[in-house]
Amino acid sequence: MSTQATTARTASPGLAAAGASAATARSAAVAGSSSAYAVELKDVRKSFGKTEIIRGANLAVKPGERVAIIGPNGAGKSTLFNLISGRFGSTSGEILLHGERIDGLTPFQINRRGLSRSFQVSNLFVRLSVFENIRCAVLWSMGYKYSFWQFLAGLRDANDRAEEVLAMIKLDRRRDHLAMNLTYAEQRALEIGITIAGGSSVILLDEPTAGMSKSETKRFIQLILDVTQGKTLLTVEHDMGVVFGLADKIAVLVYGEVIAFDLPEAVRANPRVQEAYLGSVLADQQAAGH
Amino acid sequence: MHIQEKRPHFHFRPFNIGRWVIWGGFALMLAVAPLLWTSSFAQTMLSQVGIGIIACLAYNILLGQGGMLSFGHAVYSGMGSFLAIHALNMVSAGALPIPVSLIPLVGGLAGLFFAALLGYVTTKKSGTTFAMITLGIGVLVMNMSLMLPEFFGGEGGVTGNRMVGPKGGTLGITFGPQIQVYYLIAIYCFICTAAMFAVTRTPLGRMLNAVRDNPERVEFIGYSTQNVRYLAFIISGFFAGIAGGLGALNFEIVTAEVVGPARSAAYLLFVFLGGATFFFGPIIGAVLMVVALVLLSELTKAWLLYLGIVFLFMVMYAPGGIASLIMMNLRLAAFGKLKRVWTSYLALGGSGLVALAGVAAMIEMVYHRQLNAALGPELQFMGATLNSQGLDSWLGAVFVTGVGVAMFELSRRTFSREWGTIQEEIEKEIKRREAA
């Protein structure tokens, strides 16, 4: 059994301990790294055929920082997420997670190193219950891997952790419903739940509030803040209200390049950002009454 | 961090009474079935049902649990059969000192070995590509079976003799009488069914469901979808091999047909008919498989056509198979609404049978004209004499079909309305209970 699993299983059976176990296991690995950055991109490029989508992106995110990546449609935000999470391979450049190169690794290898992501369109296990969705996301980090000699019902730490995550995302009353039968907002919450359940130290959220009403968005920002406490957060977002409510720092991506990466006020005042993106967006959102 | 205060935790209930009743009932059914149907033909059929249950459940690890559509699963049950019959012959020759009752395990290990070998290639892909590779491997092995007569026995197959123990047998068990073979099959059937059910309740089993639902997401929660599929494939191959080994003991002859595409297609067809989405669906499928392959084929030459028609209607109207129909009605029963659809079911069943009788009369007349013309134009059908060249027989069949279809359509509309109303009532009841 792996060290992670041993750490997880020998923890106190209480809820808090069970909840902390996956995170502890992952953060133990992080603590061993010498890098000052949780995520680092060095001159990352990505081309599809002759079209270069990401053109030498550079970014360095410190552990615990909350970073929003903004930019116009087609700037390459989601592509950047896909590169970091291993969904796409980069054409050149380096991507580092806690100082370790992860470009070229598969998504599951990257996830095992402590990075988890959500998707713009809810990406759930639709024929499984809400509880099973979360429990699936917990199993690897708890060390159960491909076990076919242990009953799920007897895995107390994994079950407790899944229950805890359900409570955190406020879906405990819907635990036995199939994921396909949830409302849109509930599916988005479950998407977040699956992302954080494994205790990854770096969380990537791709437009987590897309398609939500104003009141739902407000509640959702608080939910994200709660469940990602102490973690490094990167989020792609169009809604400036969400960006300023959520992020410590903002990275502005325009035509595949990070043209600014700073505190929100500095980014807001940056004339290059104003010209390339933010001026028009803020004007649009003010006109729309946001 | 918000911590849950109430703890509606998962309760592990190893002494769940319902579970014991179901498994106890299953064991009892296996035990008493040959006492209820005592003829040797019935015992042969029951033996085949037991083997079919293991094979179909093994196949459903791929199809229902993992969403892997395999067109070549007979390779693993078939290779299990061949290795088992060779092992049996080695036992006969005194070259292999194992009891006959363990021969099926040799089949299981053979299935496991070939699944590990060939599955390494097939499970690298999923979806249509996976299906095509399995089809290719199935055809490859089928053709190899004719090219390697030393191992596969050529067209005549490989024969064996299961009565190889000491004279009088061990504790009187010689495996000569069919009833003794049946009980050996029943024991394997129970153990394998329980083991396969247990696998669905493990981390690997659940991740297999996750791979079925959304393989992409599985990769982002730490799992290699290929590894999950590969392990499931190996487990499935093991149980398929046990089924094959039992088949070798049961028939004492193994021919190339057991690794052929027709056998693979039968697994797919009957697992689908039984219901791939529920664990017990393939058990129903296995019973249907034996009934169709053994009984129906005796009754009519057109049995494959009937099977095709049934399959067509199931795909169109009940893609979840018979198991899903049962579960839907259990849901109605749980809300006390089943009695409201009984009359509709009777009307649907009655009118459906009338329509089927009309269609079947026409099919039988066509088959008679094509295949039995030398016997004269007349044929017996459900106690009536039909003339395959007479206009009145054809008009009568068309009339019966028309009446049946019209009655069925009327019943279906009434049933459809009633069903919709009941479903709405159930949804309201669920919401009311949730709110409460």
Image (tube, grey):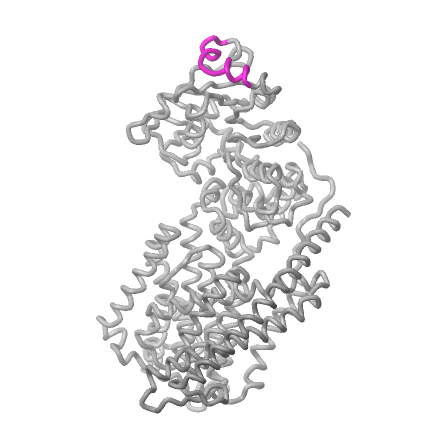
Residue B98: image location, x then y, percent: 40, 76
Position of the N terminus of chain B by quadrant: top right
Instruction: Classify B92 as above or below A202.
Output: below
Q: Is residue B99 visible?
A: no
Residue B214: image location, x then y, percent: 48, 46
Residue A10: image location, x then y, percent: 60, 43
Q: Which residues are magenta?
A: A270-284
Q: Quadrant of residue B104?
A: bottom left
Q: Is residue B423 visible?
A: yes
Residue pictured at 27% horizontal, 81% vertical: B156
Which sits in the foreground, B49 or B248? B49
Which sits in the foreground, B26 or A235? A235
Instruction: Classify A135 as above or below A211.
Output: below
Q: Quadrant of residue A265?
A: top right
**Is B186 contained in the magenta span?**
no
Instruction: State the residue lying farthest toward the right.
Output: B436
Residue B354: image location, x then y, percent: 54, 77
Number of numbered markers: 0
Instruction: Classify A283 as above or below B144.
Output: above
On screen, residue B298 versus residue A279, left or right, reads left
Instruction: State the residue lying farthest toward the left.
Output: B147
Residue pictured at 57% horizontal, 45% vertical: A133
Instruction: Classify B331 as above or below B170.
Output: above
On screen, residue B239 versus residue A163, left or right, reads left
**Is A277 contained in the magenta span?**
yes
Residue pictured at 52% horizontal, 64% vertical: B321
Helix, strand or loop for the magenta stretch, by majority: helix
Which sits in the foreground, A82 or A73? A73
